[in-house]
Amino acid sequence: MANYLFSIVVASVFVAVLCAAAPDGEGIGKFVAFAGALTVALVALSPLAGGIDTWIGGMQTEWKAQLQDTSVPDEEQSAKYLAYNIAVTTSEIYSLQMQDLSVSVYPAKDTKVFTPETVHVTLPAGTQLDFAEASQTLSDLFSCTVSVKAKEGGIP
């Protein structure tokens, strides 16, 4: 497909240069413009000469070689991304330092698309916060069950 588009661009640029160099007027200028348009049209229609099926097959082969499915990242990467976003949001909302937070994401099993089953956020010991309200706020923001608690005795 890239070669096909490249050939159209090259033909168009070549014809544009010829048309710019051709003298203005009724004779040669019109002939060069007509020949150039015909050339670009033939280059654009060149896949039809080999057959539509062959051309489409070639495009599919090129696409398969270059295509990577990045629409669904792996589960571990998605969990880390969600944990980071929850930590940033919690830090901003409740004026806490990110390094003091611990976020654990537990994905649902047997699903084709990453779906967090539960998320646990552990805050520094002694944090004065309504944990039920914080859990509800984060659950609403991230559309998953988030539980918030404080460290007890230095163990999360």
Image (cartoon, helix red, strand yellow):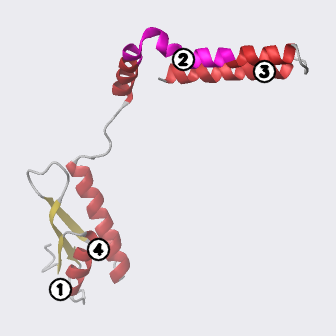
Which secondary structure, mark 3? helix
**Image check: 64 left or right of 9?**
left
CA neighbours of label 4 inside 10 A, class few (<14), some (14 to 19), many (20+): few
Q: Compute the Cα span from label 4 to label 2.
A: 52 Å
Q: Comparing marks 4 and 2, which lies closer to the viewer?
A: 2
**Image check: 108 left or right of 23?**
left
User: Which residue type does callout 2 highlight?
Assistant: Leu
The earlier-in-sequence mark between 4 and 3 is 3
User: In this figure, which residue is indicated by the disc labeled 1?
Assistant: 132
Contact (Cβ within 8 Å) of mark 4 with mark 3: no
The earlier-in-sequence mark between 3 and 1 is 3
User: In this figure, which residue is indicated by the disc labeled 4?
Assistant: 141
Which secondary structure, mark 2? loop
The earlier-in-sequence mark between 4 and 2 is 2
User: Which residue type does callout 1 highlight?
Assistant: Ala
User: In this figure, which residue is indicated by the disc labeled 2?
Assistant: 45
User: Which residue type does callout 3 highlight?
Assistant: Val
Looking at the image, residue 22 lies above or below residue 120: above
Disc number for residue 17? 3
Please report the bounds of the magenta region as a residue range. 38-55
CA neighbours of label 2 inside 10 A, class few (<14), some (14 to 19), many (20+): few
Q: Comparing marks 1 and 2, which lies closer to the viewer?
A: 2
